[in-house]
Image: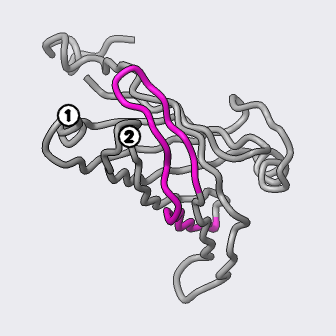
Amino acid sequence: MSTPLFDDLPAPLTSVQTRPLFVMHLDVKSIVIVGDTPGPFRRVGIVSSGTFAGERVSGQVLDGGSDWQTVRSDGSTLLDVRLILQTDDGTNVTMSYRGIRHGATEVIRRLEKGEEVDPASYYFRINPMFEAPAGKYAWLNQVIAVGVGHRFVYGPVYSVFEIL
């Protein structure tokens, strides 16, 4: 549906173009429950390893990352994640992202019990940012990315896309 506001915009402002950056799988240890705090209900996932693979950048996720989760009263889970990616040629790149996961109560309950659910049955999105040293991967410093996630029985997987 067209609206007068959008009718006058140049084409680059009317849609978002992306290209695949990589697919990433994380190995997360058992979630540490902090519980109800003066703020939110808090839990933390420690990322022990993982892999990422794409046409322009691939490698492994180093041990020591973490996923600080805020479980909101509406059932949504907010993610605040920090990781170190090590490319196949040994360059370390930081990746941080915020995200949100939400869906029907039964779907989320099954997901958190480790059961397989249809990725289309809930919403799981992230917005990664990168810090890379000068050199081959410095282009990552100038990328805005989005990701679509899914929690498989063996851990989370993200398809990450560069916004063009």
Are discs 2 and 1 less than 8 Å apart at CB?
yes
Is 151 in front, or is 132?
Answer: 132
Is 142 in front, or is 89?
Answer: 89
Mark 2 Cα shell of 10 Å, populated few (<14), some (14-19), many (≥20): some
Q: Which residues are magenta?
A: 49-73
Quarter of the image with the N terminus is: top left
Q: Which residue is mark 1?
A: 136
Element under label 1? Answer: loop
Q: Position of residue 83 (x, y in %)?
A: 43, 56
The disc placed on residue 62 is: none
In percent of the image, x 64 and y 61: which residue is there? 74
Name the outermost residue toward the bottom.
38
Is 48 in front, or is 116?
Answer: 48
In percent of the image, x 60 and y 60: which residue is there? 48
Quarter of the image with the C terminus is: top left
Determine whether, in the image, residue 6 is placed left or right of residue 154.
left
Q: Which residue is mark 2?
A: 87
